[in-house]
Amino acid sequence: MKYTMIALAIMGIMITLVGLSSWGGGVQAEPLTVDPGLAIGNELPDSREPGLAGPQGGAAGAADSIQSLPDTDPPILPPIVMTTTVGLEPAICARTSQITVEPGTRVVYCYQMTNNTSVELTRHDLVDSHRGTIFEDLAYTLRPQASWVITDTIRITTTTASTATWTAYDASSQHMFQATDNAIVIVVPDAFRAYLPLIRKQ
């Protein structure tokens, strides 16, 4: 009488065949190596590339069809930004850089500076091309991303176009930042005011 025991191992493990025979009363063991690519159940090795799924490549195939968007750099802001406006309300900054008035009108100049740097700005100069120096080496700590507004009211008798320049320094005085902006006040007799355009800040 002859018994045969086959020990099968999946995933590439050696399969050993042991034959028990009544002939000769001895026990003989003969190792048998099986191709590790085969598995029980007649399953064939997967010939698809790793990461593919489904008939058309599944998730990997879909991912390959998606085009990556190019990297977009954020806009670069100037270190400081200055805005000059002119209006008639003493306590409110106007939104216009040009205004038309009658001779002798009191006009409010509004100078606004925004600190876009990563450091505090501690000293400031402001010069107007028409009015001269408004302040120089003025001590004021302007934190990053903060704004500072200065207003000045003067009487205008003739058409005035001016350029304001704001200069700011950090605490170490090693860095200087500068920005400019323009404003114009047009002086005409009242009868002609309705025909002149008004320019607004965008």
Image (cartoon, helix red, strand yellow):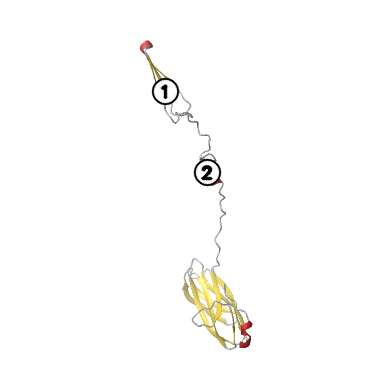
Where residue 130 appears, as percent x and y from the top left, is 60, 82
Res 83 seen here: yes
Q: Which residue is mark 1?
A: 16
Q: Earlier in the sequence, mark 1 or mark 2?
A: 1
On screen, 192 above or below 19? below
Q: Are marks 1 and 2 in contact (CB under 8 Å)?
A: no
Q: Nearer the viewer, mark 1 or mark 2?
A: 2
Secondary structure of residue under mark 2: helix
Amino acid type at mark 1: Thr
> Which quadrant of the rendered structure holds the N terminus?
top left
Seen at 55% across and 74% down, the residue is: 83
> Which quadrant of the rendered structure holds the C terminus?
bottom right
In the rendered structure, find residue 8 and report the number of the disc placed on it. Answer: none
On screen, 45 above or below 167? above
Residue located farthest toward the front when viewing the structure as drawn: 55
Q: Nearer the viewer, residue 164 or 198?
A: 198
Amino acid type at mark 2: Ala
In the rendered structure, find residue 60 and report the number of the disc placed on it. Answer: 2
On screen, 189 above or below 75? below
Q: Residues within 10 Å of mark 2 (few under 14, many from 20)?
A: some
Where residue 15 appears, as percent x and y from the top left, is 43, 25
Secondary structure of residue under mark 1: strand
Q: Nearer the viewer, residue 38 or 168?
A: 38
Where residue 96 appears, as percent x and y from the top left, is 56, 77
